[in-house]
Image (cartoon, rainbow, N blue to C red):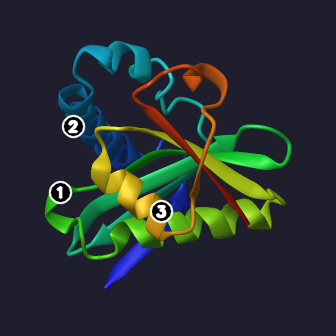
Amino acid sequence: MITIIKTDFRNEDFHQLTKALDEDLIIKDGDEHDFYDQFNGSEGINQALVVYGYGKPIGCGAFKPFTMHIAEIKRMFVVPEYQGIGIGTKILEALETWAESLRYDACILETGTRQTDAIALYKKNGYQIIENYGQYKGVKNSVCFKKKL
């Protein structure tokens, strides 16, 4: 049984999970980590989720406004030993439902070409590859996605 709670960037479990995410990204991003890291802060994120299962926090995700009608998905992470059992999909669905309740029409997100599991998750959940947006324009190792809600 899993439980998903709504929270914000001040939640200690969210903080610990995003710290683990950042440690993973340091390895996956390699030399490009500093570039990506500057856009991945959790400070000020008011829409965050923490997933609890097996007696502990096992995943998280968040979104923030990108435009008045588009939310940007951020800080998606599932503890490695719980990946591949649908937790990522549950996080995405909960974030989308929350964003829709706040009258967002679509969600966008960015991930790196090296995050093949993340790319597969987003495609499986109906996200379409779009032209890189914002700070990711022209960045060859970024893949951007969008999904209409």
Task: Report the Cα–Cα distance between label 2 and label 1.
Answer: 10 Å
Q: Nearer the viewer, residue 92 or 56?
A: 92
Q: Earlier in the sequence, mark 3 or mark 1?
A: 1
Residue type, numbered disc 2: Asp
Q: Is residue 28 above or below residue 123?
A: above
86 left or right of 83?
right
Q: Which residue is mark 1?
A: 80
- Which residue does the image show at 21% across and 37% down from the upper left? 24
Residue 108 % position (x, y): 63, 47
Task: Report the Cα–Cα distance between label 2 and label 3.
Answer: 21 Å
Camera sees residue 81: yes
- Which residue does the image show at 31% across and 85% down from the upper left? 1
Q: Nearer the viewer, residue 45 or 95?
A: 95
The tag on residue 131 is: none
Q: Earlier in the sequence, mark 2 or mark 1?
A: 2
Residue type, numbered disc 3: Lys
Question: Split into 4 quadrants, where in the image is the C terminus?
Answer: bottom right
The tag on residue 24 is: 2
Q: Which residue is mark 3?
A: 123
Task: Report the Cα–Cα distance between label 3 and label 1.
Answer: 20 Å
Mark 1 surroundings within 10 Å by alpha-carbon count, few (fewer than 14), some (14 through 19), many (20 or more): few
Residue 101 % position (x, y): 77, 67
